[in-house]
Amino acid sequence: MLIPIIIFSIFKFIPKDLKIHFVDVGQGDCTFIETPYGKTILIDGGGSSSKDFDVGKSTLLPYVLDRGYTNIDYVFISHFDQDHVRSEF
């Protein structure tokens, strides 16, 4: 009886318009968040060991633009390994 009440309580308070996207940027990680207040957050940008392929221009920028955004409000970098921050856009 207690578990259904806890689950219902958790889902009741999660914002319905919060969207979290895990973007496939190759080897690295990238998370794009759209908040219920219209803010955008990018966590890590991904990267590639190849200097011939720009993840920012070729993958991340089209992904963000496709969702109708022309700017990102907040950018967070978890650490500076190449597979997390080697994006330029």
Image (cartoon, rainbow, N blue to C red):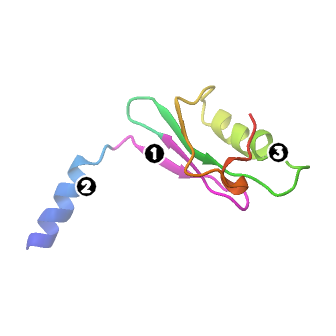
Residue occupying the point 74% across, 34% down:
89
Secondary structure under tag 3 reads loop
Label 3 belongs to which residue?
54
Mark pair 1, 3: CA separation: 25 Å
Looking at the image, tell me whether mark 1 or mark 3 is earlier in sequence order: 1
Residue placed farthest to the left in the image? Answer: 1
Along the horizontal axis of the image, is 74 left or right of 9?
right
Label 1 belongs to which residue?
19
Q: Amino acid at mark 1?
A: Lys
Q: Are marks 2 and 1 in contact (CB under 8 Å)?
A: no
Task: Name the spot of residue 69 as percent of width and height, x first.
Answer: 60, 29
Q: Amino acid at mark 3?
A: Asp
Residue occupying the point 74% across, 47% down:
86
> Within the image, what quadrant is residue 17 found in?
top left
Q: Amino acid at mark 2?
A: Phe
> Within the image, what quadrant is residue 62 found in?
top right
Q: Nearer the viewer, mark 1 or mark 3?
A: 3
**Label 3: how many residues lie within 10 Å, few (<14), some (14-19) or many (20+)?**
some
Q: Which residues are magenta?
A: 16-33
The disc label shown at residue 11, or none:
2
Report if residue 39 lies within the magenta region: no
Along the horizontal axis of the image, is 30 left or right of 26?
left
Report if residue 21 lies within the magenta region: yes
Total labels drawn: 3
